[in-house]
Structure formats: C-alpha cells, structure tokens
Amino acid sequence: MGKFTPGTKVKTTDSYYQKFGRRVIGEVTDTDPFKSDDLTVVRWDYQEGRIIKDHQGTEVLMMTEDLEVAYQ
C-alpha cells in the first residue's frame, strides 16, 4: 500500500517547495481509496510559504514522490 505506513510523519521535498513555494508537514493516514504506491493521503498539520488555508488540518491526496520522512 505505498511507501509510507499510516501514522508516518512526512514533509514535502525541497523540489516540491521550489515548484510550488510551499512546505507541508503532516501525517500519513490510512484512508487511501486507491491503494497506490504513487499516491499518499496526508493530513496537513503545518504549512509554510504559499499556504492553502482550506487544506490545513484536512486530508489531501499527494504524489508520493513529493514526500519524505519528516523525523528520523
């Protein structure tokens, strides 16, 4: 079911930040209806840069390639 297991804290990559001007930190949820390695559902806990207020605290479907583990 994807690269990240539910509960994993993730953040967007530097290339995502360069492309969209936004950094997101959140938690992977287990509600991915697609069960795809290419897609990951993340609850957005924190944003910096060009924030999207409506996405704060919600689950957002993201490209897995745009994510990395936030805390080792």
Image (spheres, grey):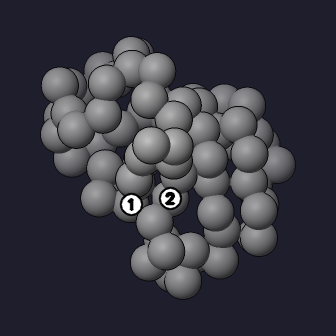
Which SS class for mark 1?
helix
Q: Residue furthest top?
A: 30
Question: In which quarter of the view is residue 27 placed?
Answer: top right
Which residue appears at 51% of the width and 43% of the height? 71
Q: Quadrant of the N terminus?
A: top left
Residue 52 percent coordinates (x, y): 75, 55
Tell me: 45 left or right of 38.
right
Q: Residue furthest right?
A: 53
Question: In which quarter of the view is residue 51 placed?
Answer: bottom right
Residue 34 percent coordinates (x, y): 23, 27
42 versus 15 height, above or below: above
Tag 2 or tag 1, which sits nearer the N-term?
2
Which residue appears at 59% of the width and 38% of the height? 26
Res. 13 mark: none
Question: In which quarter of the view is residue 15 placed?
Answer: bottom left
Q: CA distance from mark 1 to mark 2?
A: 6 Å
Is the residue marked by circle 1 packed among few (<14), some (14-19), or many (20+) residues within 10 Å?
Answer: some
Q: Residue furthest front?
A: 72
Res. 12 mark: 2
| Residue type marked 1 | Asp
Mark 1 and mark 2 in contact? Answer it, CB < 8 Å. yes
Tell me: 44 left or right of 46.
left
- Total residue callouts: 2
Residue 25 percent coordinates (x, y): 62, 47
Q: Quadrant of the C terminus?
A: top left
Q: Is residue 10 visible?
A: no
Q: Which residue is mark 1?
A: 66
Is the residue marked by circle 2 packed among few (<14), some (14-19), or many (20+) residues within 10 Å?
Answer: many
29 versus 25 height, above or below: above
Which SS class for mark 2?
strand
50 versus 10 height, above or below: below
Tell me: 13 left or right of 21.
left
